[in-house]
Amino acid sequence: MNAAVEVLQSSHQYINRDRLWQSLMELAKLGATVKGGVCRLALTDLDRQARDLFVQWCEAAGCTVTVDGIGNIFARRPGRNPALPPVMTGSHIDTQPTGGKFDGCFGVLAGLEVLRTLNDLKLDTEAPLEVVVWTNEEGSRFPPCMMGSGVFAEKFTLEATLAKTDAEGLSVGEALNAIGYAGSRPVSGHRVGAYFEAHIEQGPILEDERKTIGVVLGALGQKWFDLTLRGVEAHAGPTPMHLRKDALVGAAAVVAAINRAALSHQPHACGTVGCLQAYPGSRNVIPGEVRMTLDFRHLEPARLDSMIAEVRQVIDNTCEEHGLSFELTPTADFPPLYFDPACVDAVRGAAQGLGLSHMDIVSGAGHDAIFVAELGPAGMIFVPCEGGISHNEIENADPDDLAAGCAVLLRAMLAASQAIAHGKT
Ligand SMILES: [Zn+2]
């Protein structure tokens, strides 16, 4: 076993919990809201200040910093063998308009803390290490989300992405230039030795199960639809029940069906109607039209399709029963993703080696790691967040849990560096 892994195998006392926490609190001052959250939208001047602070910290830690054409920032700590592809980690530092201090920022600063810890211990790695800040993961100012990692993984072209605009008509390219983060490093063609992303869970499972580490197996596949049901608007008094064509009554059956379908395809199934509008929206008019969104998620493609087929059947039946017509339009289709088994094992092995309680988990949300996984072996580490709450100003996490997640990240990255050096990837 390599000396670095030996030094770190007995405990995670080497991670400086307070330094990690202080860095998170320092970063959270940029865009701090009165309710204790953070509003730091992508490519704003606050984002520039946060990026500048990250770059300053990385340079102080001895890293070489480069920026690519979509503004992704790469802080590199050299390895003994510069020819090896880097072991990468990272996340994002943009937030939702009413975001918290930990979503994304934890993954970035856990990466920085890994480098700082290795510096403290004067340990070198075989492969170079890189901490990345991915541009615009949230997509709240400039859709789509996971923009920077998407360009890096060649899911989106640079040219089309730079032309995307915000609500004021300002383009991504203009905003990048304005904050000085339109870099010269090519956006694509990079080798990824391995990629690990630490993240707060953004859900309640770890807290509920009283586990410190989530070993992320993959991410749920998602299929989204817009559904419109059409009946006939009519007066709520003079129209007897048996002669109505009430679109909202049909919609109610669909809402119940999607919930039932998800419950009957556990584990790892979700079904949600997030938006529903009834028209014309008057208390004494029978709704003639309902527009709603359907969101299906599952880890297994066949089960995802079964859920959809079950709901489809209910739509047919309820339209028949209530004299309605409908239109069902697919709006998104993301296949399920399974992380690299060696990376998953590295995360689980690190948690076990550190004596941390852990469980296998899947991600219901999108993350940069899902795109980076297209370029090389990738894995994720989840830590609990208070009440499972995220994308909210009250988002909170325990400093000990964050340090534990960071310790797992350190060990997983060291293990990956060893594996790359021995040609195991
Ligand atoms: Zn995030």
Image: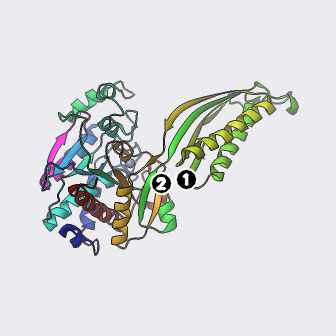
Say which of 17 and 225 sits in front: 225
Going by the numbered disc 1, the residue's amino acid type is His
Q: Is residue 60 located in the magenta-colored stretch of the structure? A: yes
122 in relation to 34, above or below? below
Inspect this view and state whether residue 96 appears.
Answer: yes
Q: Is residue 104 located in the magenta-colored stretch of the structure? A: no
Say which of 390 and 197 sits in front: 197
What element does badge 2 sit on?
strand
Going by the numbered disc 2, the residue's amino acid type is Val
Task: State the image coordinates of residue 56 (x, y, percent, origin top left).
Answer: 16, 49
Which quadrant would residue 404 be assigned to in this image?
A: bottom left
* Crowd tier of the residue under label 1, counting other residues whose Cα lies within 10 Å: few below 14, some 14–19, many 20 or above: many
9 in relation to 124, above or below? below
**Image position of 392 (left or right of 67):** right
Circle 2 is placed at which residue position? 362
Which quadrant would residue 358 be assigned to in this image?
A: bottom left
- Tell me where the magenta segment starts and ends, as one range: 53-71
Circle 1 is placed at which residue position? 268
Q: Residue at horizontal 20%, vertical 67%?
A: 2
Q: Are the two marked residues, 1 and 2, in contact with CB atoms closer than 8 angstroms? A: yes
Which quadrant would residue 306 be assigned to in this image?
A: top right
